Image (cartoon, grey):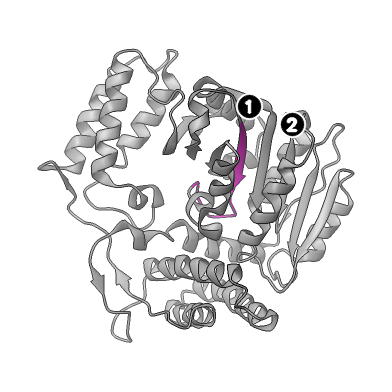
Amino acid sequence: MMHPLASRRLLALALLLSISDAATAGAQQAPAPTASVAVTRADLATRYLLMDAAYAAADSSARLADSTRAVLNRIFDRSTLSFFGGRFAVTAAMMDTAITMADPTYRYVRRELPRDVVIDGRPARALRDALTARLTRLDSAGPLAQAIVSARARAALLVDTVSAERSAEFLAEPRALARAVAAEVNALEKGRNPYARQVGDLWRSYHGANGMAVAMRVIAPRAAATRAVGVLLALHGAGGDENMFANGYGQGVAARLARENDLLFVSLATTPFMTSAVQFDSLMAVLGRDYRLDATRVYLLGHSMGAGAAARLAQERPRALTAVACLAGGAPVTAAGAPPVLFLGAQLDPIIPAARVKAAAAATPTGVYEERVNEGHTLMVRGAVLRAVPWMLQQPRR
């Protein structure tokens, strides 16, 4: 079981990540916060995204010396504790220091989230309410039940004031979303599943075991429209959400690798998968109705808390998974017929020490351990994903 302090550290960091793309939602620019302007969670979240991008750029160009990389990772991991303690100004200063180490040209610019959203002359909530009313009249228990769940959840993202706490709202482009949901409702009213064989990037939701709502990002390659494709499932760390692997964690590098290898990429809300493997069964049933899946190519990736959930799924559904990767976390997988499991620890990780990850690998008959040197708990993810996905693809198909 995770130590309470470690859990709080993870939650603090994941709260930053869960709103990390606030800067991309558009709106007006403002000067960087000063002593007279309170630092907000959105300010810190924006900094995380900038840090992620700067670190990726510096890493790709080999600009960072090992000693600089180590200091940068330590500063970033310590900033999570400051954030949890409510010391936002201190946290911002620490993050600014880390970003500047990766990108000397960095200058923070604050952006505000949209308010009073109007689409085609109507408040966003009016469109939402109209679409929801149409969905209410459909058969929510029939063969299109899960598609209706998705459409209803997507319509709910049409809001007048975008929340800085819910990334699914500020990642959406309201006008494009309104058009898309209207087309989906039209299809449902005609008895068609609008998500069947749909390619591209889509935020969705489905009802899992016991009717639990599970949010997910589905990014389908063009190949998914015409033939069977493999699946890459991704589970985020504590306190995060389904958008973290798609937009953060190395600028969405996992989604890019999935697309390049013709894999259906599904980034999930992790919490439902921590308590019951039946949630996995429900997920695969939903995906199997919408796409032709290659059951010999089902890969699972998890970070931190998500690594623990991934290990549990490998233990409880060993023959359903082709390969698994646990980043900065995980647990022993000892079930008969277990898939190959790659455990990646971070040398400087103060939250889940590398020794703990290495021990889990040693206790896993199919386990392999590797360590990210001079890196900490979160900035290790980009490099770990770049290593883990090709490794999983090299494993024999089930």
Mark 1 lies on residue: 281
Looking at the figure, which quarter contains the C terminus? top right
Q: Which residues are magenta?
A: 230-242
Spatial CA distance of label 1 from label 2 is 9 Å
Q: Nearer the viewer, residue 233 or 394?
A: 394
Secondary structure state at the residue bearing disc 1: helix
Q: Amino acid at mark 2?
A: Arg
Secondary structure state at the residue bearing disc 2: loop
Q: Nearer the viewer, residue 85 or 300?
A: 300
In the image: residue 357, left or right of residue 327 = right
- Residue at the image point whose x is 38% and y is 80% from the top: 107
Residue 199 picture location, percent across and down? 44, 32
Q: Is residue 77 magenta?
A: no
- Residue at the image point whose x is 38% and y is 56% from the top: 165
Q: Are marks 1 and 2 in contact (CB under 8 Å)?
A: yes
Check disc 2: other Cα within 10 Å, few if <14, some if 14-19, many if 20+. Answer: some
Residue 163: name its quadrant.
bottom left
Q: Amino acid at mark 1?
A: Asp
- Residue at the image point whose x is 52% and y is 70% from the top: 84
- Residue at the image point whose x is 67% and y is 45% from the top: 309
In the image: residue 365, left or right of residue 54 = right
Check disc 1: other Cα within 10 Å, few if <14, some if 14-19, many if 20+. Answer: some
Q: Is residue 304 visible?
A: no
Above or below, 234 against 262 in this view is below
Above or below, 81 against 301 in this view is below
- Residue 250 image label: none
Residue 339 picture location, percent across and down? 80, 37
Residue 205 picture location, percent across and down? 45, 34
Above or below, 342 against 321 in this view is below
Mark 2 lies on residue: 317
Q: Is residue 21 visible?
A: yes
In the image: residue 208, left or right of residue 381 = left
